[in-house]
Amino acid sequence: MEEATTLAVEELTTLAADTVVYPIAPGYRVNVRRGPGTQYGLVRTLPYGMSVPVYCQKPGERVSGPYGTSNLWDNIANGQFVSDAYVKTGSDGYIAPRCD
């Protein structure tokens, strides 16, 4: 598990200086999926205290979390999505372009 945490930290440190990252809800380890829903395969699980970039957003399965109920899913890397209900973006709507 330590290897996954190190990898996630390395991924964040290689982001461009102007890339905005958003915190995952405190106390949650969030599943990263291959698409916008829990029926998509699990890629990894984010460790506690992570922040993630949001490159684009896509509608999908409606999920309830600490930041409300949402059908938005945030693309945090190529082929990797997390439910927006677990990401503190400061908005209930789109904060990034819609994914193709």
Image: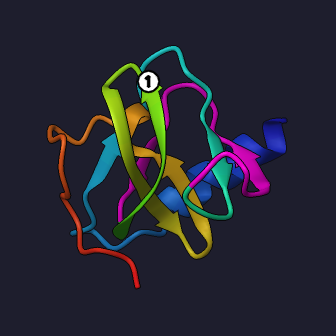
Residue occupying image coordinates x 68% and y 64%? 34
Residue reaching furthest to the bottom:
100
The x, y position of residue 70, in whole percent, is: 35, 39
The overriding secondary structure of the stretch rendered in magenta is loop
Q: Quadrant of the C terminus?
A: bottom left
Horizontal side of 1 relative to 50 (left or right) equals: right
Which image quadrant for residue 59?
A: bottom left
At 32% across and 52% down in the image, what residue appears?
21
Relative image position of residue 62 (x, y in whole percent): 46, 41
What amino acid is found at the position of numbered circle 1 in the picture?
Gly
User: In the picture provided, is 72 more to the left or to the right than 46?
Assistant: left
* Residue 5 falls left or right of residue 61: right
- Residue 90 position, x and y percent, is 15, 37
The quadrant of the rendering that contains the N terminus is top right
Q: Which residue is mark 1?
A: 65
Residue located at (25% from left, 58% from top): 20
| Disc 1 secondary structure class | strand
Residue at the spot x=21%, y=69% of the render?
18
Q: Is residue 13 visible?
A: no
Q: Nearer the viewer, residue 53 or 7?
A: 53
Crowdedness near tag 1: few (<14), some (14–19) or many (≥20) residues, C-alpha within 10 Å:
some
Q: Is residue 16 magenta?
A: no
Which segment is the magenta one?
A: 37-54
